[in-house]
Amino acid sequence: MSHEHLNLKQRIRLEVWVETDMTQKEMADRLGIVPSTVCREYRRAGGRAGYDARRADALARKRRRDGKRETKKLLSNDGIFSYVDEKIRLCWSPEQIAGRMEKEIGARICHETIYTFIYEECPEWKPYLRQKKGRYRRRWGTRERERNREEAKKRRINTRPDVVDTRERFGDWEGDTIVGGERTTGILTHVDRKSGYLLADLLKRKTAESVWKTTARRFSNVPFHTVTYDNGSEFSLHELIRRDTGADVYFAFPYHSWERGTNENTNGLLRQFFPKRMLFGMLRQKDVQHAVDLINHRPRKRLSYLTPHEVFVEGKSIAIQSGM
């Protein structure tokens, strides 16, 4: 949710909504802002009744211009700067400083101007503030709305091409991570649906950025038509994965692990070597690769007892039987 100032288009919508029974919360949700922004906008313009969008926009521009002029006072007036510097280091709030300044040195400045000056011109004063910018309490429902927006960007497994379901070609993968005992480490796994061939990469930090970059590097010269992930936050940069690899990215439905059965089964095989609660911090990629090689060279019943390596790398033809 945005805390930024409104633009004219948004203000015009607020003016239209004045005549409706819409609540300020409903207005804020439609504009993608917090309700306090709507409340503050109406208050600054003299109230909801008679709200004029163009007049409110002109007033807002004037406040910004005046604020910039006021900020320059702190840069050009040594007396004001010294007074603010002295009091801020005594842990006075900008409001307290502004309130006493006229009495003590005969100068006036708005407390909001002091805040602006601190964050834009004098960050060394930040530690003296009792309330740090950005440390706002998250409003109820904000996280849920953000999550819903992210969910809307995902392509679900039921929109995949039929060729993925029939396992007719190489390059349709399922992906996931297995988590180390530290909870911050992991192993990124990708399994080819046709052959069961496993690729695994050690992640010293299990983050969305590391998953994106590792995947882009891993599939720079490997067939990669589609990939289906679970809903972990480490796959939140799926649009960048798609951009850098050219693969279509899909997601299973939440809590439907069986929709990625090939990957889930293979992760179980990998857990034989890296059991739950095992610390991955001391592992090396070659340790992971050793386990991967053992798995890829095991015969599989569904491959008529050929190995994934023989099918994927050596290209041995096999009619895929039912199963994971």
Image (spheres, rainbow, N blue to C red):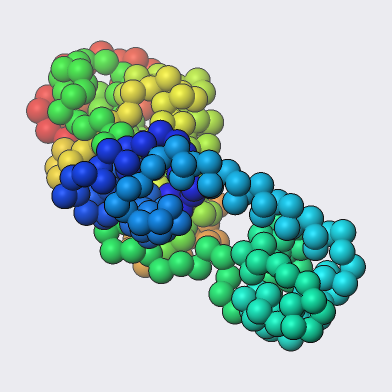
What residue sits 32% from the left and 43% below the top? Answer: 14
Residue closest to the eye, 73 or 254:
73
Q: Could you say where residue 284 lies in the image, as x and y percent from the top left? A: 55, 52
Note whether 106 is above or below 155 in the view shown.
below
Q: Could you say where residue 237 lies in the image, as x and y percent from the top left? A: 43, 39
What residue sits 27% from the left and 59% below the top? Answer: 141
Relative side of 142 to 186, left or right: left
Quadrant in the picture for residue 258: top left
Q: Could you say where residue 151 lies in the image, as x and y percent from the top left? A: 27, 41
Note whether 213 is above or below 268 in the view shown.
above
Note whether 98 is above or below 240 in the view shown.
below
The answer to whether residue 34 is visible is no
Relative side of 319 to 73, left or right: left
Note whether 144 is above or below 309 in the view shown.
below
Residue closest to the eye, 25 or 135:
25
**Viewport quadrant of the C terminus:** top left
Residue ranking furthest to the left: 322
The answer to whether residue 256 is visible is yes
Residue ranking furthest to the front: 50
Query: In this figure, what is the number of numbered marks?
Result: 0
What residue sits 16% from the left and 49% below the top? Answer: 21
Relative side of 2 to 267, left or right: right
What residue sits 49% from the left and 49% below the top? Answer: 4
Q: Could you say where residue 247 lies in the image, as x and y percent from the top left? A: 38, 22
